[in-house]
Amino acid sequence: MFKWKDRFFFKKKYLEKAHTFYEKYGKGTVFLSKFVPLIRTFAPILAGIVKMPKATFLLYNFAGSVCWVSAMILGGHFLQSWFNQKFGYSLKDHIELITVIIILITTLPVIYKLVFSKKTVTSKE
């Protein structure tokens, strides 16, 4: 892709920015992307496009996946136990609503940042 010419949906400068970003923050991005639904989809693809080293990618992708799955399993178990003991209420009956709420909570900050971030305009002189 680094040899491609600029097109409507592809700009080489964005690919170069992504490459610089992944050189600096790639490990954390791959690891933390497991915790954000929309980013989880695109971070690994972009890591491949910018040629992140395979061993580094696999290590941080695996570690992020294990941490995310562990957090969800343990969090769900202890939250269900706590709700059941404290309120006599089972969360299992409302798992769909809980899933939607979790997705919204984890996605809204990213959407907010994309919509309301200040965009800098570069002038060509």
Image: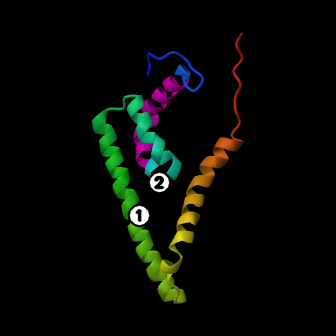
Quadrant containing the C terminus in the rendered view: top right
Q: Is residue 86 above or below residue 17?
A: below
Q: Is residue 110 above or below residue 51?
A: below
Q: Is residue 92 above or below residue 53?
A: below
> Is residue 41 within the magenta segment?
no
Q: Are marks 2 and 1 in contact (CB under 8 Å)?
A: yes
Q: Position of residue 79 (x, y in %)?
A: 47, 76
Q: Which residue is mark 2?
A: 35
Residue with the most extreme top position = 125
Q: Is residue 24 left or right of residue 10?
A: left
Q: Which mark is first along the chain, 1 or 2?
A: 2
Please tell me which residue is depicted at 41% across the width and 35% down the height of the picture: 47
Marks 2 and 1 sit apart, C-alpha to C-alpha, by: 10 Å
Instruction: Give the numbered dot on residue 71.
Output: 1
> Is residue 29 within the magenta segment?
yes
Part of the protein shown in magenta? 14-32
Please tell me which residue is depicted at 52% across the width and 87% down the height of the picture: 86
Q: Position of residue 84 (x, y in %)?
A: 48, 86
* Residue 99 vs residue 22, the one in the foreground: 99
Q: Position of residue 72 (x, y in %)?
A: 42, 65
* Residue 111 vs residue 59, the one in the foreground: 111
| Coloration of the structure image | rainbow
Q: Position of residue 44 (x, y in %)?
A: 41, 40
